[in-house]
Amino acid sequence: MKNTGARTCGAVHVWGVRLRERLEEASRQPDRGDISITTVIIWAAGITGAILIAGTIAIVINKYNGKLTGL
């Protein structure tokens, strides 16, 4: 069980090194082209709206299907 503490310390050290490297890279390249939260919200709202519109159309067509067959 003595190795567990050494493994934990090693993992924490590796994690710290990787975090430091990522922070240094982020400071060198501030605009990495990451997608913004605003873009995600706009896409989610657009997809939700499209699903609602398609669902409404499907409900209306099913409701009036019998009345539309004679046209």
Image (cartoon, grey):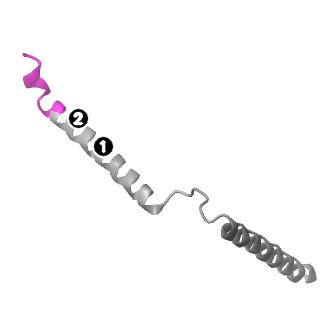
Secondary structure under tag 1 reads: helix
Looking at the picture, which amino acid does disc 1 mark?
Ala
Mark 2 sits on what residue? 58
Residue 66 picture quarter = top left
Residue occupying image coordinates x 92% and y 83%:
2
Is 31 left, or right, of 45 in this rendering?
A: right
Residue occupying image coordinates x 17% and y 31%:
61
> Residue 41 appears at what percent x and percent y?
39, 58
Q: Residues within 10 Å of mark 1 (few under 14, many from 20)?
A: few
Magenta stretch secondary structure, dominant: helix
Mark 1 sits on what residue? 50
* Quadrant of the snapshot with the N terminus: bottom right
- The mark nearer the N terminus, 1 or 2, is 1
Q: Residue placed farthest to the top in the image?
A: 70
Q: Residues within 10 Å of mark 2 (few under 14, many from 20)?
A: few
Residue occupying image coordinates x 80% and y 74%:
17
Residue range corresponding to the magenta coloring: 61-71
Q: In the image, is residue 62 part of the stretch drawn in magenta?
A: yes
Residue occupying image coordinates x 61% and y 59%:
32
* Quadrant of the snapshot with the C terminus: top left
Which of pointers 1 and 2 indicates the residue nearer the eye? 1
Q: Is residue 59 above or below residue 6?
A: above
Q: Is residue 64 above or below residue 48?
A: above
> Residue 24 appears at what percent x and percent y?
73, 71
Q: CA distance from mark 1 to mark 2?
A: 12 Å
